[in-house]
Each structure stands twice: as structure tokens, then as C-alpha cells.
Image (cartoon, rainbow, N blue to C red):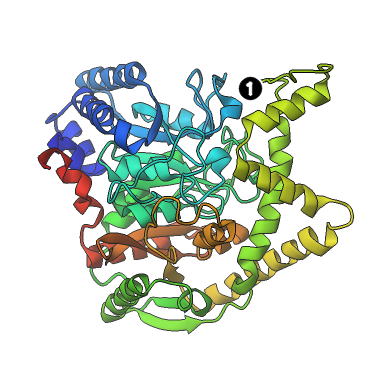
Amino acid sequence: MSELLTKTALQLADMMAAGEITSVELTRASLDRIKAHNPTINAFLHVDEEGALATAREVDEKRAAGENLGRLAGIPIAIKDNLVIRGMPTTCGSKMLEGWLPPYDATVITKIKNAGMPIVGKTNMDEFAMGSSTEFSAYGSTKNPWDTERIPGGSGGGSAAAVSAFMVPLALGSDTGGSIRQPGSVTGTVGVKPTYGAVSRYGLIAMASSLDQVGPVARTVADAAALQEVISGHDELDSTSLDVEVPAFEDIVAQVGADRVKGLKIGIVEQLSADGFEPGVEAEFEATVKRLEDAGAEVVNVSLPSFEYALSAYYLIMPAEVSSNMARFDGMRFGLRAEPETGPVTAERVMAESRGQGFGAEVKRRIILGTHVLSSGNYDAYYGAAQKVRTLVQRDLDEAFSKVDVLVTPTAPTTAFKFGEKIDDPMAMYLNDLATIPANLAGTPGLSVPCGLSEGMPVGFQILAPAYRDDLMYEVAAAVEASAGEIAGSCPAKEWENN
């Protein structure tokens, strides 16, 4: 492996600015790494070698001409396959969209292109972002670079594995119930869900519109901060986009000193730090909290009673929105079209046949559940009640943040489990999102940063901050990262060529 790929995105940006490397050299190294290991890891569904190198050459020419370029210009990036890129295949990990070429760019893709970042390809994911292990992709599961017999998390397992395996320094994901943070936790990468509305969702193929959020995947907190700075900002094409000033996240992280957490009040969520968490995960979480306390933070226990019901509420609200959003995939306008083998070819029968062949089991399960939840006889009992719980979660978090600066939890109850271990038990799979879901229900930011290893597998430490305080979340994450040491960089993938 090229030594370049072991460096962080910001180190590479500095080297490029100093004329020590070119974007073409770096992008070529990334593409070679993908070519060598994607057959095993299956992190990428599509690789755009020609397009990535064309962008890299353009950046090098502009830099040579003395043009003022963006901070991450020339840094290769991978994109989760539910973000549309004009003319590049987009499948959402589903047969339903196989062969579809989007006619436009998502707003975050426009920002990435304007920043001069070569897009090397689209990453694997659970079908339409429904899953916690990337085992529900129609194109095969993605392997965890720490142990290829284990899952890389989901639904953004492809983006997390691509970064963890040193294929790319940066990637984009989407987080509906933890789909950036949970893969980050089990692959030893940094995964961020920004405040809802801070990053445009225009061009993100919606799973559950009130919960979805685009965010960065990186190997360091500083890299994630720099990428969030690039993709954030108001977008008139997204009615939920926030019209607020984008903080200088990279500078904020760079200025974090050893005593940054001194005097901060850090709340431990009682409902998310006990039963159901693996002993090794609990031990690393408690050790990290102790280090923050030793650094001067005041640690207090916080009770959030509504969190007990957050998972149940999420799995009523999310499928309800899924059943609505999936209705557009009918085999009539784009993607897969399947006709019945016998009988009349009516629009209704084409829709049924296309959906029957195009959707996988997990998507069908959630559509059926969502349709049941929204039916006239059940709406108030299920969907209405879940929305009331959502309001309670938001109130509990508001009250908690009036007493503490940030909340912390383990990101996931376990480290990466083995393939097949939970695929036949949907409830066990859903429990992986136990700690990450409240932030999506409330629209607040959340970040997972590696804090240690349990039996050789990475453990994630989640930081939850008030809405619009992504900057504070990054500050605490940088302090956690500094105390835990370099975990992402110690992934066994670093030594693949030597074994």
C-alpha cells in the first residue's frame, strides 16, 4: 500500500499545498488500493476511475497555475450509493434501481465538486439504507477490514469500510437512526450526524425524510470537521435546510487544547450505559469517561426516561415514512420494470411484479409495517403515540442540555458481530441502533469517535450535543481522540500487503 493512504486527509492537503505530492498521485494510489482489495471487502458498488483522475488533473493544473483552491481540493472521496451523482450509477443497494443514471447532482455532490475533490466511486449499503450490518445489500455484504468475518455496520458499511481499509481518506454517508455512527463504531472510524438541516438532503434518496441526515466519515475528528465544513450550508432546494452560519469546524478542532474539557459538564445517560451492553464495550466507555474526568470535566448521571421508548417509537415512525417514500418505486418511471408472465399487463400488476422482484426482504418488511401503522384503524394507536414519544424525547434532551454541556454513551451495544449472527432476528438487529436513535428523533447532532479496543475490535464513544452545537461536539470528540490514541490508523488493513 502506498504510504500516502495511511495519512489523514488534512496531512495530505498540506502536502499537496506544499507541492510534495499531486492529486493525480494520491487518486491513483486510492484507485489502485480499491482495485486490489474491493473484490474481498466489497465496499464499492461502482468505481469512476476516469472521472476521479480527470478531477485530480484539473486540480493539479489549477494549483500549478497559482489558483486559490479549497482546503480539501485534490483529496479523493467515496460517496454512499443513496446520494445521486449526475451520470453515475445509483442503486441504493437495490435491484429496484439497477441501471439508473441520475440526471442531476445532489447539493452535497455539487459542493464536493466545487471543492475540487475527486469522487472515486459509490459505496455499498443496506438496501435503501434499511439495516444495521450491510447484509441487506442486493449486491452482497461488505466485510469489516478489522476482521472480514464480521459486519462493518449499516447501513453505511461500505463508506465506513472504505475509510477503515485505507481505500479513501474521506467518505459521505447518511444517518437515519445511526447509519453513519454505528458503522463508525464497529470499524474504528469517526462518523458524524450533523444537526438536522445543517447539511442539505436535496439529492439524497429519502428513506425517512424527517430523520435522514447526510454526514462525514473519516479516520480523525479533524478530517471529519473539515469535510462537514465543505458540505454544510443553506440550500434553497431543501425546505428543511437551516439558514445559519457554518462554523469554522476545522479551526475549532485545531485549537482544542489538553484542558478543553476542563469545567465542562458531561452527562452520562443512565438508560444507555447498563444492561444490554457488552462488558468490553462498557469497560472502554467507562475508561474514556474517567479520562475526561481526570482532564477536568465534571461528570454527572442524567436520567432520560423517554429514551426507554425511543427505539419503539423510531420503529413506528421510520417504517411509516418508508412506506410513503418507497411508493415512488413502481416500475413505471425509472429503474426495474417487471411484467407478469401471464394474464393482462395492467399498471397495477406491473407495479406489484416490479416491487416483488425489485425489493428485498427487509424493505418489504418495513413497507408492510409502515402501511399497517398508517392504516385508518391504527394511526392514532401507533403512529400518533410514537410521535408523542418523539416529543418527549425532544423535551427530555432539552431539559438535559439545560443542565449539562454534552451527553455521552457507548455508540453501539456491541462490537462488530459475525455475519449471519442476527440476520434472522430483526429485533436483535434493531437493538444495534438503541443509543443512536434519540438524536435522529430530536434532530440533534451526534458523533462517534473510537475510544478503545475490546478483544481486538474497535469500540465507539458517542457524543450528543444540543442542536446547532456541532462545534461543541467536535471539541469534546477531539479531546476523546487525543486521550484514546490513534485507533483508526491501527486497523489490520494497514498490514495486508505484508501478510
Can residue 216 be seen from the camera position used here?
Answer: yes
- At which x and y percent is residue 249? 37, 51
Can residue 200 be seen from the camera position used here?
Answer: no
14 or 137: nearer the viewer = 137
Marker count (numbered): 1
Q: Which residue corresponds to mark 1?
A: 336
- Which image quarter holds the C terminus? top left
- At which x and y percent is residue 178? 50, 55
Horizontal side of 83 relative to 323 (left or right) equals: left
Image point 48% across, 33% down: which residue? 81
Could you say which quadrant of the image residue 348 lies in?
A: top right
- At which x and y percent is residue 38? 31, 32
Question: With respect to residue 69, does 192 lie above or below?
Answer: below
Question: With respect to residue 8, does 181 lie above or below?
Answer: below
- At which x and y percent is residue 488? 26, 53
Horizontal side of 236 relative to 112 (left or right) equals: right
Question: With respect to residue 151, does 257 lie above or below?
Answer: below
Image point 58% across, 26% down: which residue? 97
Question: With respect to residue 18, does 183 lie above or below?
Answer: below
The three-letter amino acid code for the residue at tag 1 is: Leu
Crowding at dot 1, Cα within 10 Å, few <14 / some 14-19 / many 20+, comes out as: many
Q: Residue furthest front?
A: 342
Could you say which quadrant of the image residue 281 lies in?
A: bottom left
Could you say which quadrant of the image residue 238 lies in?
A: top right
Image point 70% across, 44% down: which residue? 367
